[in-house]
Image (cartoon, rainbow, N blue to C red):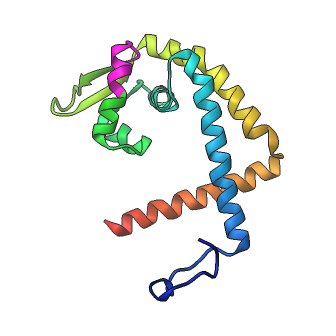
Amino acid sequence: MASGTSGDAETDVRWLDGDEMVTWLAMVEVNTAIQSAIEDDLAPHGLTSGDYGVLARLSDTPDHRLRMCDLAEALHVSPSGLTRRLDGLVRDGYVAREASSEDRRVMMAVLTDVGFEKLRSVAPDHVATVRRKFIDHLSRAQLRNLSAALLAVQTGTALAQLSDQ
C-alpha cells in the first residue's frame, strides 16, 4: 500500500516513506534473487538451501552436534519443520538423530562424516554464488555498513521477541 494512504482504521499505521520503501523493496528483491540463485546452484547436489543451512550450522559446532530444539531456533523453523527437514538428511546419511548422553530425553542432530564431506563438496559452489550475487557488488565500506545495519535489525528483532514473551 502506498505511503500516505489511509482510511479510518489505518490512521495509526506508520506508512513507509520513500527512502524506507526503496530500502525495503530492494532488500526483498535482493533476498529473493539470491535465495533463488542459491537454490538453483544447490539443486544439482541434491540439496535445498534449508538442507545446506542444517549442514552448515552443525559443522560450525565444536562436535558437529546440536540439540534439536536449539537447531530449530537457530534456523527459525518449528520443531516439526526441523523434523521434516531432517528426515531427508537422515535418509541420505548426512545427519543422524541421537539421544543426548547428558539427558536421554533430549534428541541431538549430529552431522555425520558423510554429511561433512557433502558440505565440503558443495561449499565452493555455495560461496561462489554468494560472492557472485552479493559480496562482489559491495565495497569493503559498504559491506561493513550493511553488516552493522543488518545486525541492528537482528538485535532489535531479538529484543522485540523477548519483550513479547
Residue 37 on image: x %, y %: 65, 32
What range of the chain is rendered magenta? 86-95
Tell whether 112 sits left or right of 79: right
Residue 130 on image: x %, y %: 69, 34
Residue 117 on image: x %, y %: 52, 12
| Residue at the outermost front position | 7
| Residue at the outermost left position | 105
Q: Is 97 inside the magenta-drawn segment?
A: no
Q: Residue sitting at 45 percent across and 16 percent down?
A: 115
- Identify the image quadrant of residue 42: top right
Image height check: is 146 above or below 11?
Answer: above
Q: Residue sitting at 80 percent across and 38 percent down?
A: 136
What secondary structure do most residues of the magenta stretch adopt?
Answer: helix
Residue 60 on image: x %, y %: 50, 30
Tell whether 83 sits left or right of 43: left
Quadrant (top left/top right/bottom left/bottom right) for the C terminus: bottom left
Q: Residue sitting at 44 percent across and 28 percent down?
A: 58
Quadrant (top left/top right/bottom left/bottom right) for the N terminus: bottom right
Tell whether 85 sits left or right of 48: left
Count the marks: how many?
A: 0
- Identify the image quadrant of residue 101: top left
Image height check: is 43 above or below 147?
Answer: above
Q: Is 90 inside the magenta-drawn segment?
A: yes
Image height check: is 102 above or below 31?
Answer: above
| Residue at the outermost right position | 139
Q: Residue sitting at 56 percent across and 21 percent down?
A: 43
Tell whether 154 sits left or right of 19: left
